Every structure is written in C-alpha cells, then in structure tokens.
Amino acid sequence: MAFDHDTVRRTAHLARIALPQTEIPAVADQLERIMALVEELRAIDTKGVPTMAHPLDLDQPLRPDTVGNHDQREVLMASAPAAEHGLFLVPKVIE
Amino acid sequence: MELHEFSLRELRQGLQERDFSSVELTTTLLKRISALNPALNAFVTVTESKALAAAAAADARRAAGEDGPLLGIPMAHKDIFCTAGVRTTCGSKMLEHFVAPYNATVVERLAAEGMVMLGKLNMDEFAMGSSNETSYFGPVRNPWHTDMVPGGSSGGSAAAVAAGLIPVATGTDTGGSIRQPAALCGITGIKPTYGRVSRYGMIAFASSLDQGGPMARNAEDCALMLNVMAAHDPRDSTSHPAAASDFLRGLDRPLQGLRVGVPEEFFGAGLDPEVAAAVQAGIAELARQGAAVQSIRLPNNPHAVSTYYVLAPAEASSNLARFDGVRYTHRAANPADLTDLYQQSRYEGFGAEVRRRILVGTYVLSAGYYDAYYRKAQQVRSLIREDFRRAFAEVDVIVGPTTPTPAFPLGAKNADPVAMYLADIYTIAVNLAGIPALSVPCGFTAAGLPVGMQLMGDYFADDLLLNVAHRYQQETQWHRARPSLQAGEA
C-alpha cells in the first residue's frame, strides 16, 4: 500500500536523509507497520470536531522589545564542525 | 540506612546537623557511581570536579548561615537539558560533542538553590524510545534485573535514582518518558501539567507534548523538586503564568472523600495479570483510606497511541530539521555538495528510530496526506481531551496501571517498532491532553520486578496527585524497597 520504495525514497529526500539503497526495503516494511497502526484513525467519526494543536488555550505572550543577549559569537561557534574567521564553513554552493 | 538511601528531607537534616558535609555526601555518591555505573550505564557524563566544586560552594553557603531544602544535595540531569560548559548529547551521535552555550532554565533554577550536579544521564536518542535501547551511548540496564530494560526515554534517570547513585533526577515526558521508566524501576515520577516546567534549554522532540519533571524515590521528594522546577519563564512562550505553586502545602491532606475513577479501558486485553493485581491492590488501599472508587470510561483512550504516532513524529520532523551538519552537530566527511552534506550528516548522526520517526512525520505532513493523517489526528486529540474533561466532572483522580507489563528483556521489542510503541499505551493520552500524571511503586511481580500505579489529574491538579501519592506512601512500603546491587555485577 502506502510504502512502496519510491515513496520511501521521496520521503527521505524531503527529510534530507541519505538512506542507502540497501536499507530501503527494511525501512519500507517498518513504515508500513507504523502507518497500519495509524490507519485506524480514518474510521473515527470526527465530523464537526475542532482540531487541537496544543493543550493550553494561551495567547502568544508579548514582552517588551529590549536588548537582552549580547554578542556571543565565540561561544556559539565553539561547537561548529568547521569554522574559519568566525564563519561556518560549508561546501562550495556557487561555482 | 546508608547515605545513598536517604530522602531529601533526611539529607537536609544531616547537612543541617553537620552529620556530613555536601562534599562528603558528593564524594560518597561519586564513588558509588564509579562502582556501579559500568554495569548500569545510567550516566553518559560524570562531572566529578565540577560536582566537588559545587558541593564546596554549597558547604560555604551553609557555613554562612544559609539553609534551603535542596542546598548541597546531589542530583543529575537527563542529558536533554542544556548545561553550559558540559556536553549535552541527547543520547545521539548527532550531538556527541555538543557543548551548549547556555543553561536550561531548569538547570539554572536547581543550581541556584545550591543543588550539586553529578553529571548527565543516559536516555533514548532524542527521547524517542521506551526502553533506553536507542541511545547512541548504549542501553541502560534495570537495577532490579540487569538483563531487563529500565524503560525510556528517561531510563538513565530512573535507573540512577533506583540504584541510589543520586537521590533525585530530572526527566522529560512526551508520551510516558518519566512515568514508564519510573514504573519499571520502582521509583516515583511526575509529568506535570503542560506549561508548569520551562522548556527553555530542553532539547525539543514534540513541542506540544514535551514536559520536564522530577524523578525521585518518593512523592515528597518530587514535591520538593517541583517547588523549584515549576515557574513561569518568559523565555518559553508556552510557560504558564500560574506555573509556580507550593506543592508541599497540601501533601498531608487525608484522602477521605476523594473521588477516584478507574477507567475500564485501562484493564482490558494486553494487561499483564500481575500488574493488574498490584494496581487493584493499590486502588484498594486508596479506598481503605476513605476514597470513593468508581468505574469510569475513557472511550477514546484506545486511539491515543495512533494519534500520538501521527502528531509526535510530525512535530519531531520539524524540530529536528535544525540538525544539519553545519552549526553544532555531527558532520559527514567529504560531502559532494551542500545537499549531500545535510543528507549524509543526518543519516550518520541520527540512529534508526529517530530517522524512522522523522520519515513518518515528513510523510504525514507531505502534500496530499495532511488532511487524512495530521488534521484527523488533531481532531481525535480533541476527543481524547473531551474524555478527560467529562471524567473530571465526576472524579478528582483517575487511577490505573502505568504500563501494561513489568520491565521486559533487552532486545525483546527491537524487531517491531509498533510493539515498542504499545509499551506507552496507558501514558500517551495524558500528554495529548496536557494534564498531569504520576507513577508510584505499588508492588512487585513474582520475578521481583517493580509495578507502577498511575495517578492522573485535571489541569493544574499536580498538587493533588502528589498529595494522594504521599498519603499512599505513608501506608505502604513499596517505594522503600531497594535493588541489591554489588559493584561489578552484570
């Protein structure tokens, strides 16, 4: 049903996960089982039932727009896998 | 009784009376960790020198006349809470070397009270798991039986508290991750009402479900921790303005007249008979203390697991998009281009269960499936909340098992992800609704494994749950039982 190998490949691409060809059949099988679990939801009558995104009916709070955090470039860059001159290094994007 | 078995109140008294100093207490527990942790694998990181420095600072504060219920008392954090200067791995290769530039609010608040952090506790990767086997740093073992899982995702927290490595720990609960390991390890743990405990600096899994809470050996210790952990935090937009409370105040109230509801749906097929018997005995004890017990229905509870496995992966796929191999995570070697860098880093950095949940989340949110799965699940979430709303019009507390079975052997549920998901069948609805719930030890199986009883309450009834658990623990001894662990065992 839902999880043919193409669907797995397409979903993995959307999620930016490089799934090796050899793993696709096993992943398809597991996703199939999970979606089979979820499938029962379709049969529930939810006509007119509101959606619920969040447990609390809170408004988004606002706070005064004041300067709080100061420059922390060095601390923030310290865990970078590759950095130079205070910038993150990535493979060349523009030729 | 030995030092590692003391409650928070007993520890405070010992510190006040100068029976021992915080440095002595900390040294004792650090020794216990180095002896027992190799067999349990509860700690990912032990921060010995920082701990001794913090203990010395607490002793100095006490010498200067300060006192407080948590001053100088050792603890450890689930490795999902960011700690400045100490790595925060979230149980993942992705964050193996990540040192957060700031402290989580929970970390900051407990440290300000003078608590002494001994290290960071193992967990399922990104809190996704019910057995602690998805951790990149290896599984945690159950102190009651080291061939068994401790539960998850806060398995390191539960095992460390049960084994007496620390008196209390922090945990987080998205679908049962505090209560389920608390039940399987024989300790007490509470998932507070959503919005009680700040999520600032707590690495996000599913933001509308995640909630931090304490894990301890009794309800009073949970209350002492929650008194500090629960507070409004302007840095978390979902933090509730009325988050703070005094959870000790009503702890001793008698249970006379308490209305207890027992949901039929929690005692159906799939419930282990020994677990059922222990929980029924627990309910009988509440009745003996004057509670009025009645049967109730939560008709949509059987849909909770499937609802959760749409919504939680959907939120996770969005939250975990930030781990890209560029700024602070694992990075794949020799990527061909930027897309390849993202894709390879995410494949290598995430374990199989995390990848699986990201894929499910991506799928249910993708074009053409949103209405069929995501929107539908959000509607069923409303129905699940309505069930609780109706029930709490009639009863004060809902009681049932925390888990369908006691601890299971390592490896037993790894072949089928759905079998593992069903370990949380009784805990998930609480997170979907956002109400508080806790697990208390209520017995043992014939094989000597602990059983947990779950108490669920209405929004902001956390204090009532702690009150009921405390009164229960005044008349029962289950929470006092300790596993017998020898150094070098397993």
Image (cartoon, coloured by chain):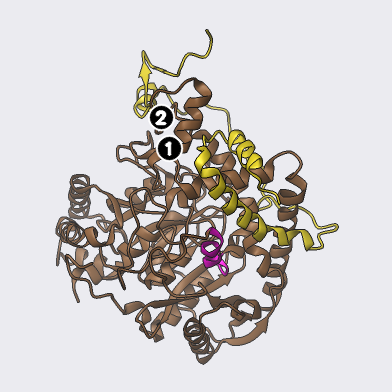
Chain colours: A yellow, B brown
- Which stretch is magenta? B417-427
Q: Position of residue B231 (x, y in %)?
A: 49, 52
Q: Is residue B280 above or below residue A86?
A: below
The residues bearing labels 1 and 2 have C-alpha atoms spaced at a distance of 7 Å
Q: Is residue A67 above or below residue B238?
A: above
Which residue corresponds to mark 1? B348
Inspect this view and state whether residue B207 appears: no
Q: Secondary structure at mark 2?
A: loop
Q: Position of residue A75 (x, y in %)?
A: 35, 27
Which residue corresponds to mark 2? B332
Task: Report the amino acid beneath label 1.
Answer: Glu
Task: Report the amino acid beneath label 2.
Answer: Ala
Q: Residue at x 50, y 21 (%)?
A: B338
Q: Secondary structure at mark 1?
A: helix
Quadrant hosting residue B98: top left
Q: Nearer the viewer, residue B378 or B190?
A: B378
